[in-house]
Image: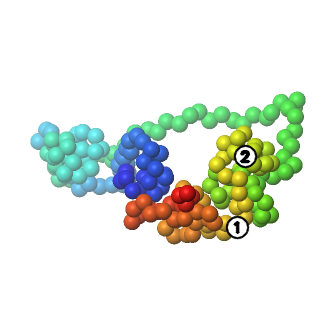
Amino acid sequence: MEENTVVRHFGSLNEASGLVCWQILPDEEYDAGGYCNWSGCNSEAQGGWDCNLNEYECETACSGTWCTGATPPPAPVADPITSPPVVPPTTPPATSPPVVPPTTPPVSNPTTGSPCCTWDLKNCSLDPWCNENETQCKSGCGAPFWDDVSACPLNGVAKGYDCLDNPCCPGLYCKEHSQWYHSCEVPPS
């Protein structure tokens, strides 16, 4: 992927690695208008579906002869897709204790105006223990901020996210990395 696309969608170049593989899967109704052959156009399609995709692929990638005639190649067949076996759902044993929902729902964006444990200055930690006090937040949970996030509007952008189209949450500024990517960051001290 292009460098700025990776940064814009994943935050940094270190977040994306590996190969991107593409495979053309032809439609069974596809008619290439000919077929690839190495035996003097004997009405027999040779090579895989990729050789029979078009004249260019046949003659360059497959080193064959592109034949046009009354007998089109057989419809290409895509590789079979294997999937894990289907396992029917099981009923938990009768001795299982009932699942009890939590008595206090996790805080995601309070409107109370009180501080909470946050990593991005938009959302509070989902762990109630981290939100009890600043010491637990910063020491026990490892979050960098103990702050009131209630002033961040719904369309406000959190720390580290793209701010080309929406404003940063309070306490952050929109830092330009390139003409295509800006991110909300904490102002330098």
Q: Secondary structure at mark 1?
A: loop
Image position, residue 37 (x, y; %): 17, 42
- Residue visible at 72% across and 39% down in the picture: 140
| In the depicted structure, whether residue 24 falls above or below residue 94 | below
Does residue 55 appear to the left or right of 15 in the view shown?
A: left
| Residue shown at 70% from the left, 45% from the top | 138
- Please state the horizontal and vertical placement of residue 9, each as a whole percent of the image: 48, 55
Label placed on residue 137: 2
Residue 128 in view in this figure = no
- Say which residue appears at 49% left-offset and 36% top-offset: 82
Is 92 or 107 nearer to us in this picture?
Answer: 107
131 or 65, which lies in front?
Answer: 131
Element type where label 2 sits in the image: helix
What residue is rendered at 75% in x and 48% in y? 134
Q: Is residue 176 left or right of residue 187?
A: left
All told, the count of numbered labels is 2
Residue 118 lies left or right of residue 48; in this view the side is right
**Residue picked out by circle 1:** 151
Label 1 packing within 10 angstroms: few (<14), some (14-19), many (20+): some
Q: Residues within 10 Å of mark 2 (few under 14, many from 20)?
A: many
**Residue 61 rendering spot, x and y as whole percentages:** 20, 43
Amino acid type at mark 1 = Ala
